[in-house]
Image: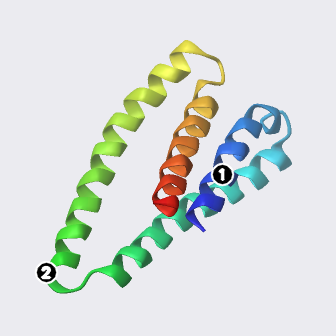
Amino acid sequence: MIIALSGMLALGALFWPIALQNPLLTYGLLFLCGGAFVGIYTVVLTIVGSKFRGGELIGIYATMEFMWGVGALLGSLLAGAAMYLASHGLAFFVAATCAVFMGMALHRTMT
C-alpha cells in the first residue's frame, strides 16, 4: 500500500504543472495527493503499531515524530531551494522525494 501511494504521489506531482492551468484539475489533484500523503502516514502508523508493543511502541512513535519534525524543517528548506532553482521545482522535489520513499519501501519489501 505504501509503495502504491508513494508511486501515485510521485506521478501526481509531475502532473502538477499541467494541472495548475485548470482550477478543476488543480483541486482534484490536490484532493488526491492530500489523501495519499495522509494515507502513507496512517499506514505507517498501523504497521508500526502491529509490530511493536509497550515501551518499544512509545519509543518508535517518539522517534517517528522527531523525524517528522526534522523532515518538516529540512523538507521546507530543500523545497524552497528547488523552487528557487526551477519554476516547477516544488513539483519535481515532491516527485523525487516520493520516488526515493517508494524505492526504500520496495527495497524493504524485497529484503
Q: Is residue 87 left or right of residue 70?
A: right
Residue 7 position within the rendered picture, expressed as x and y whole percent measured from the top left: 66, 51
Which numbered disc flags the more N-terminal residue, 1 or 2?
1
Q: Residue at x 78, y 55 (%)?
A: 28
Figure label count? 2
Q: Position of residue 58 (x, y in %)?
A: 19, 75
Image side of residue 77 versus residue 18, left or right: left
For image coordinates 77% across by 38% down, the residue present is 15
- Which residue is denoted by mark 1 in the rendering? 7
Q: Secondary structure at mark 2?
A: helix
- Specify the quadrant of the image occupied by residue 91: top right
Q: CA distance from mark 1 to mark 2?
A: 33 Å
Q: Is residue 11 above or below residue 34?
A: above
Left or right for 34, reference 97 = right
Amino acid type at mark 1: Gly
Disc 1 crowd, CA 10 A, few/some/many (<14, 14-19, 20+): many
In this view, which residue lies farthest toward the left? 55
Residue under the point 44% across and 68% down? 44
46 shown above or below 7: below
What residue did someone put label 2 on? 55
Residue drawn at the location 83% of the way across and 47% of the way down: 25
Expressed as whole percent of the image width and height from the top left, the position of residue 13 reads 68, 41
